[in-house]
Amino acid sequence: MSTPVHAVQAGEHGPLLLCLHGIGSSSAAFAPQLAELSAHARVVAWDAPGYAESPDPQGPLDLDGYADAAAELIRSYGSGAHVLGVSWGGVIALRLATRHPDLVDSLIIADSGPGSATDPAKAQAMRARAAELAELGPAAFAARRGPRLVSPHAPQELVRHVIDTMAAAVRLPGYAYAAASMVSADLRTELADITAPALVLCGDLDRVTGVEASQVLAGALHKTAYVIVKDAGHLANQEQPAHFNAWVLAHLDIVTEQPKGPSCR
């Protein structure tokens, strides 16, 4: 089933970098990457199905459905992409790499983990989110959840941007489908099957996913570099964009210049 999405592009040359946002966000989350990395790559950031400017999907999507929608978007631009996923977007990117390995040239996984099904408490909290959104509405929902996505010392203009982005992005039923995809996700058994080179990053002050969950990914993936982003919360790409972008560029330089070889750690 075709699942069309809205996407924003910056840059006309270089490798394709597809950016997949977190569960409470949209393409607007990648403003620093669209602005700064577009001198080196064709940067494409999507609004996931049922988010922001993308239409609602025709029916419920599971994690495979989101991965297939991302695959469809990649094919519309070419034959492969380097995929940057933040939080939920990272989980989608990992499933994309196992489901459509020919389309994933490399992975950049930021402030993510193997899915909410790995932790009963996290799964229960994720399961309750759709009802919370229905009760509060997008604006109050975002005001409650947004500040926790950045570190306690994040500038107020960033906090406001995160809240406004979430309020404009989330709606039902799309958010409910996304939350359900995370509730059922446990990627630990498939991580070792991913052959694409990967960069795993996590903010040292991430209070949502946490450093431990990102370490699970870094330890299981092949050909992995692991970076802790200092003074950053869950949205490291927005809170410390200069450091984050520098690591992404270094990763792209390495993986686009070196031929693919045997897996190594």
Image (tube, helix red, strand yellow):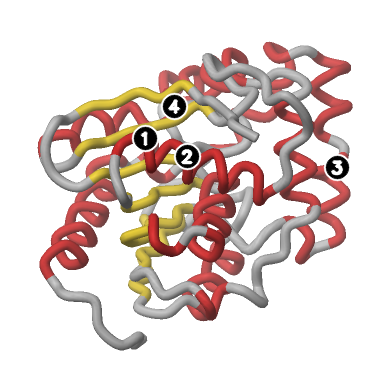
What amino acid does circle 2 point to?
Glu
Frontmost of labels 4 and 1 is 1
What amino acid does circle 3 point to?
Arg
Q: Which residue is mark 2?
A: 72
Q: CA distance from mark 4 to mark 1?
A: 17 Å
Mark 3: few, some, or many residues within 10 Å (few <14, many ≥20)? some
Label whose residue precedes the other's in the sequence (3 or 1)? 1
Q: How many marks?
A: 4
Q: Which quadrant is home to the N terminus? A: top right
Q: Which residue is mark 1?
A: 76
Q: Which residue is mark 3?
A: 127
Picture coordinates of residue 15, whole percent (x, y):
19, 47
* Towards the viewer: 61 or 249: 61
Residue drawn at x 56%, y 45% as measured from the top left: 68
Label whose residue precedes the other's in the sequence (2 or 3)? 2
Residue drawn at x 17%, y 67% as measured from the top left: 254
